[in-house]
Image (tube, rainbow, N blue to C red):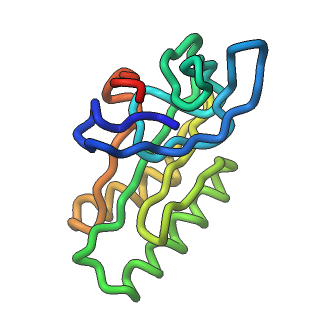
Amino acid sequence: MANLEPYGFPDTLEQLWLEPQGEDTFKVSCIPFRVYGLALSDRVRLDPAGQQVTELLEKSEHRVFRILLLPALSDGEATRLHGAIDDAVTQSHLKSEWSGDRHIAIDLPPGRDIQIVWALIKDAADGGSIAWEWGDVEQFQPGDVN
């Protein structure tokens, strides 16, 4: 789990998939949706109980690009935009994960660009249909370990 309290979400944790890398180190094996400063393939350490990420040991150079389809979109508009984003991600040979039908996290490996995705996203953002951000606009902060 990653504590989201340092980012303004008290009493909230994000579940992460982690792959053991050694006695007390793990590799992030999912695309984080809400925690800042972590990305696919980063190496992390957990608390002594093995429950929460307490330290970022090594960055993988992957980045996370997050998009939220705003509530003002009708269900039909959201469905169309969802499909268009999926198509752009597929054409770009990128990995992505959806949380529900309006929030997507896209993995950007080192050396890859998102021009196809960005062209679509820029128009949607200019039109007020989406909000977007990079997952590394803030550094990882473990917060209090419970």
Residue at x-position 74% and y-position 31%: 19
Residue at x-position 40% and y-position 88%: 76
Q: Quadrant of residue 73?
A: bottom left
- In this rendering, the answer to whether 123 lies above or below 11 is below
Judged left or right of residue 124, residue 72 is left
Q: Position of residue 120 (x, y in %)?
A: 42, 60
Q: Which residue lies furthest to the bottom in this view?
A: 76
- In this rendering, the answer to whether 46 lies above or below 12 is above
Residue at x-position 62% and y-position 26%: 50
Residue at x-position 23% and y-position 67%: 127
Q: Position of residue 43 (x, y in %)?
A: 63, 19
Judged left or right of residue 44, residue 38 is left
Q: In which quarter of the image is the C terminus?
A: top left
Of residues 61 and 24, the one nearer the viewer is 24
Q: Quadrant of residue 35?
A: top left
Of residues 79 and 22, the one nearer the viewer is 22
Q: Position of residue 46 (x, y in %)?
A: 58, 21
Q: How many discs appear?
A: 0
Judged left or right of residue 94, residue 1 is left
Q: Position of residue 32 (x, y in %)?
A: 51, 41
- In this rendering, the answer to whether 4 lies above or below 45 is below
